Amino acid sequence: MWKVTLSTMSTDCIDPIGGGLAAFRQEYAGQLWVEVMLIQGLNDSPQALEEMALALQRIQPDQVHLNLPTRPPAETWVQSPDEQTLQRARAMFGEVSQVVSPKEGYLGFNQNDPLTEVILGLITRHPMQEETLVAGLSAWTAEEVQAALLQLKESSAAQPIQRFGVQFWSAAAARYSG
């Protein structure tokens, strides 16, 4: 299975990337999934969705995952499209498309490492909700995870960030506007 992410690409990039993926698809008979990150005002206009739909028709993926910017982005203007736009995208991209939420559960860590190192490794890759960390780090108690987060904050290694009223944790080296 191959999974390709078409992130915040502008519509100028769709043709060359789509052409390359279509050529790849002709050679590759396995499962091909395409992720599309939709961002309000960037690539969610009717014209942009139409261009992506045409590219996806050429690529013929087995699945199209519509992702939304739910974690804290580096730019505060980044927002998810509205529900009507999501429904339009799903209709235009066909039955193989679906809105995909960030997965919870296994976070891919070594349980022998100190908890603070595990958390810092995870939140350095991308910000995570505190509740997702607690659920995914079930080898430790919720109190141990929260104590480790506080220790990381006090040592200036981690920072809490609010997004849509939800608390996320990120490595302190990450920069967030506003």
Image (tube, grey):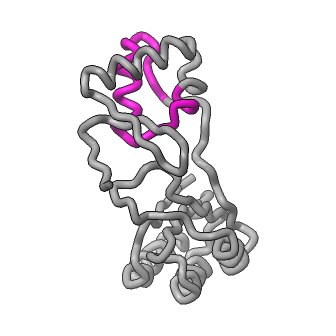
Span of residues in magenta: 108-133
Residue at x 66% of width, y 60% of height: 99
Q: Position of residue 78 (x, y in %)?
A: 43, 64
Q: Position of residue 65 (x, y in %)?
A: 61, 61
Q: Quadrant of residue 134?
A: top right
Q: Is residue 172 above or below residue 15?
A: above
Q: Is residue 54 above or below residue 111?
A: below
Query: Taking 145 as reference, is 58 left or right?
Result: right
Residue at x 42% of width, y 10% of height: 112
Residue 86 visible? yes
Furthest residue in direction right, as rendered? 95
Residue at x 32% of width, y 30% of height: 158
The C terminus - image quarter: bottom left
Query: Taking 59 as reference, is 177 left or right?
Result: left
Q: Position of residue 61 (x, y in %)?
A: 61, 68
Is residue 6 magenta-colored? no
Is residue 127 magenta-colored? yes
Residue at x 61% of width, y 36% of height: 104
Camera-side residue: 141 or 13? 141
